[in-house]
Image: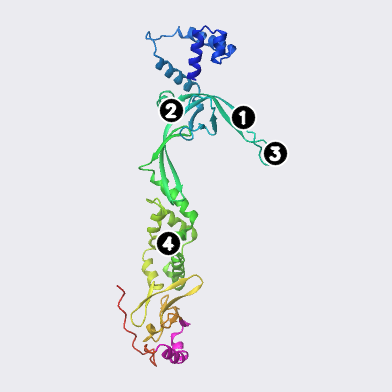
Amino acid sequence: LLELASLFEEAARARFAPEKLRRLGLLSGAVQAVERARRQIEAAARRLPTSTATPTATATEEALLLATLAAYPDRVARRREPGAAEVVLVGGGSATLDPASVVRSDELLVAVDAEERRGDRRAPGGAPGRASSRVRLASRVTRELLLDVVPEGLAFRTQISWNGEAERVEAVEQLCYGDLVLESSRASAPPPGEVAAALAEAALARGVRAFAPEGAIDRLLARLALAGRCAPASGLAPPSEEELRSALGELCAGRRSFAELREADLVAALLARLPPGGRAQLERLAPERVALGGGRQVRVEYGAGQPPWIASRLQDFFGMARGPSVGGGAEPVTLHLLAPNQRAVQVTADLPGFWGRHYPALRRELSRRYPRHAWPEDPARAAPPARRAPAR
């Protein structure tokens, strides 16, 4: 726009001589129309109070840029990339700056004159290609001009988004003109509620069980189901899927990433939601571990639709007339009795029956295969093996 104003002034100094207009590439009819408009504006301006100071060339240019922005505040655009011809328009959409434009480096501009062109390429099926806009006439804009002319259009906003690759919430503070982002930087103190909501949305889409050790959630649900079944008065019951999702959502408060969420211990959070005394009741009815004859603590495995079970060496059960039970004694634990090679030689919930019916034959075979191990004739009364020192 300033380039055209400069050409017009040069033509005016030559009194709009046709030869001069041709050399400047200006159309006589258009120039005369602009001259008439200028005289009308000057005549109106003389009736207004004005400064007696002669404006400088810089002041004149700035006044023209300011007036252009005031006339077209809805046509502000920003280059998509520094130096790129493509611009993003306020209100949505994009356009391409005409190659002949002298607005080559300014980030912000006003698209004073734009035309819509339909592309030459045709869409599949022979449909016309998408229309594109080309900015034929532009005027540069600065943030200072926006602040002077349309301060109400500027606003600071915090943009919360999910980075799927990094698995974390990112918060950016943006200076915007309408929906046009002028600048952005990492937000130092984003709204905690919005961050937690974004993390919760991404976490729930991934699934509750992704934020606990494999099988830990279903193991806890099976423990609670067994405890509630064996002692209905305890009030214990497995949470619903909606309750699981609610617990995960609460755990998102104060956190920003999947890594932080996994470290937060979802299983402990679910245990904390049990009624008063519920955790002690759960440990009594469906304990994490049970003790064997030699005092060895063994982890109890729980699963939906199957009895609880443990796996340990056959020798660890020496000295036990009966196997351990859970549910206040109502639910026998299935035993996976392992040979020294850690393979099961028997799976049973009836340890006395195993000692009486199957152990004598197994004893002969095990004594032959593992002669260095003790295989007593009466395992139910035998002394359990000495407890091994924990590995350092």
Near-viewer residue (145 or 359):
145
Relative to 50, is 104 above or below?
A: below
Q: Earlier in the sequence, mark 4 or mark 3?
A: 3
* Residue 212: image tag: 4
Relative to 98, is 376 above or below?
A: below
Q: Which residue is mark 3?
A: 126
Quote the CA–CA distance across marks 2 and 1. 33 Å
Is 361 magenta? The answer is yes
* Magenta region, residue range: 344-370
Q: Which residue is mark 2?
A: 152
Contact? badges 1 and 3 (CB < 8 Å): no
Quote the CA–CA distance across marks 4 and 3. 54 Å
Amino acid of disc 2: Glu
For the stretch drawn in magenta, what is the main secondary structure? Answer: helix
Q: Earlier in the sequence, mark 4 or mark 1?
A: 1
Q: Which residue is mark 1?
A: 117
Q: Secondary structure at mark 3?
A: loop
Amino acid of disc 3: Gly
Mark nearest the camera among 4 and 1 is 1
